[in-house]
Image (tube, helix red, strand yellow):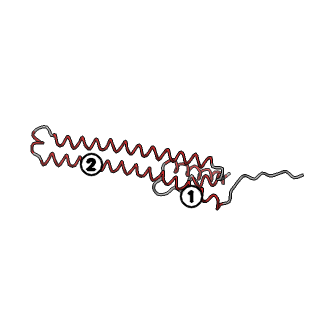
Amino acid sequence: MSSAVILPFAPKRSETTAIMGRYDRAYGVSHATSAFSEAVSLGGIALAGLFWMCGLIAYQAIPRERSGFPLVTVCFVAAAAWVVLVTRVVSRAFRVQAQLLETAVDSAVTASPFLSNPQRMEVMALLRPPAASGWDCARVRGFALLEQHRRLGRAA
């Protein structure tokens, strides 16, 4: 008597290529949004530095600033602080959106019935080595843990 063998559903590679590309593009949008949040933050710091330098120049250029209350200098320094705070809040909002998008894509990849576990790991960038930039620490840690697991599996 023979027993029936149930094979897991594994669609052809050509069918999953489009799905994997779609998820990969969604991860790309998440990483681009995160990079934009960093650009907003750095732009705010640069603009604040410009205001601070203008305050120093005003303090040196206007003799009245040194003899009494340095109103112009204080206004420039306050504007610099305000710019840093506003860009920090805006940058944080973009970063939160990027994290929410990445979490949603992770959930979609994990729950996808069209992908096998190795394909899920490939889409979630757990099988690829981390790039030089644009990768968060969790992905790098995940890759390192996967490599450690592979080495231990071969040694056993």
Hey, which quadrant is residue 127 in on the image? Answer: bottom right
Q: Amino acid at mark 2?
A: Gly
Q: Position of residue 47 (x, y in %)?
A: 28, 49
Going 9% across and 42% down the picture, which residue do you hit?
64
Residue 100's x, y, as percent? 50, 44
The residue closer to the viewer here, 3 or 94, is 94
Q: Which mark is residue 21?
A: 1
Helix, strand or loop status at disc 2: helix
Residue shown at 51%/47% (left/top)?
102
Measured from the top left, where is residue 116 in percent x and y?
66, 53
CA gap between label 1 and label 2 equals 41 Å
128 w.r.t. 80: above or below: below
- Taking the view exactly as shown, the residue that stands out farthest to the bottom is 14
Check the image and report above or below for 8 versus 71.
Answer: below
**Label 2 Cα crowd, 10 Å radius (few <14 / some 14-19 / many 20+):** some
Q: Nearer the viewer, mark 1 or mark 2?
A: 1
Mark before the other along the chain sequence, 1 or 2: 1
Q: Secondary structure at mark 1?
A: helix
Circle on res. 49: 2
